[in-house]
Amino acid sequence: MARRQASLQRAQDDDAPVGDLEGLLGYNLKRAYVILRNDFRDALGEDGFAPRVFSALSLIVQYPDITQSELARVLGIERSGLVAIVDDLEARRLVQRKPVPGDRRVQALAPTAAGIAAYDTARAAVQAHEAARLSNFTKAEQETLMQLLRKIRAVED
Amino acid sequence: MARRQASLQRAQDDDAPVGDLEGLLGYNLKRAYVILRNDFRDALGEDGFAPRVFSALSLIVQYPDITQSELARVLGIERSGLVAIVDDLEARRLVQRKPVPGDRRVQALAPTAAGIAAYDTARAAVQAHEAARLSNFTKAEQETLMQLLRKIRAVED
DNA sequence: GCTAGCTTGTTAACCACGTAAACAATTATC
DNA sequence: GATAATTGTTTACGTGGTTAACAAGCTAGC
């Protein structure tokens, strides 16, 4: 097998992937994800929401009275991991744990008025920073990218 | 503002994003990244390479005598974080730290024969599992996705 | 030459995010 | 009514990264 030793200078100007890594989906996903996660933190600033807290709040606002188990399932994380997230949101008075009549195991999660307002503000900031990051993309490219990313999830075993 | 409360059932069958999260690039990136990372671990099995170790080995094999600082820069991580990765590779006798004549601060990283062989095996396994994950994608879709992900990195500030 | 500043690799302490295992309380199943 | 399953929770742990400090070595300016 011929093993090429190329220069690392300006590797990403090339059209074809220079190294093996550039041809791997996992690597490209991770690099892009890290960039977007850093943008997210910049957008929400010091003591803003962590990404996972934002995601949880988003679902609670859009699907009020969702239970913790269902929320964990939708987010793709463990129930145990969700506890700290909901603790955080409840400590900020943005979300309330409510008992559900008929099943005393369950806690329904409902946003407070402040929670809805905070979510709307944060969502606008995140959408704005994503738009800035994608400023060199056409609308069609943005939609294609998003659709292909969702397609990866579609085959989830 | 009209706030819709939709059902969570089968949300991902819809064409248009049902919730706000589905319309956010960061969320879709993270979900896809987690899937590929889990695939990666399945592909390499117990005590296989961690993703970051694999990435480092890949670059060391393809660019032998790269220095630790340059490797960290290419990978987008801190020098301090690379130490444990190289320690790991060196403990497995897959990579060797070599002194560089003319600059006694620097350690050049070179793969051993075992390192090259282990990398080739691992790379084949990773490529195979990615191909399986993308089995419902056309070739054109795969290339488009990869190109768009790289384009996100192209605007790195 | 010499000093002041930079780079390299390293350690240590820490943080974010997640999992796995165990558990009490409650509900469902048969 | 016994057994099993589900819900939320705590605790311990693992992974993948960061920042700050440091010693050693190199470089630039005078």
Image (tube, coloured by chain):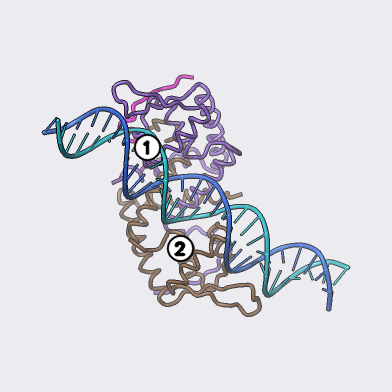
Chain colours: A purple, B brown, C blue, D cyan
Residue B126 at what x, y percent from top left? 36, 60
Label 2, label 1: how many angstroms apart (C-alpha)?
Answer: 30 Å
Which amino acid type corresponds to the residue marked 2 in the rendered image?
Val
Between label 2 and label 1, give the one nearer the viewer. Answer: 1
Is A12 left or right of B22, judged from the image as shown?
A: right
Residue drawn at x 35%, y 54% is B39
Q: What residue type is labelled 1?
A: Ala
SS state under label 1: helix
Whether B8 is among the magenta residues is yes
Q: Disc 1 designates what residue?
A: A72
Q: Position of residue A13 (x, y in %)?
A: 55, 58
Q: What's drawn in magenta, residue-wise?
A: B1-12
Instruction: State which quadrant residue B118 falls in.
Output: bottom left
The residue sitting at 30% across, 45% down in the picture is A155
For this rendering, which residue is in front, D4 or B48? D4
Q: Give the residue displayed 64% in from the left and 76% down from the top.
A: B104
**Percent x, y of residue B26:** 48, 41
Where A2 sits versus D5, above or below?
Answer: below
Judging from the image, mark 2 belongs to the subunit labelled: B
- Would you name the residue on which mark 2 appears? B53
Q: Which chain carries label 1?
A: A
Instruction: Decide which of C24, B98 is in the foreground and name it.
Output: C24
- Rendered position, C25 above or below B111: above
Q: Is mark 2 on a helix, strand or loop?
A: helix
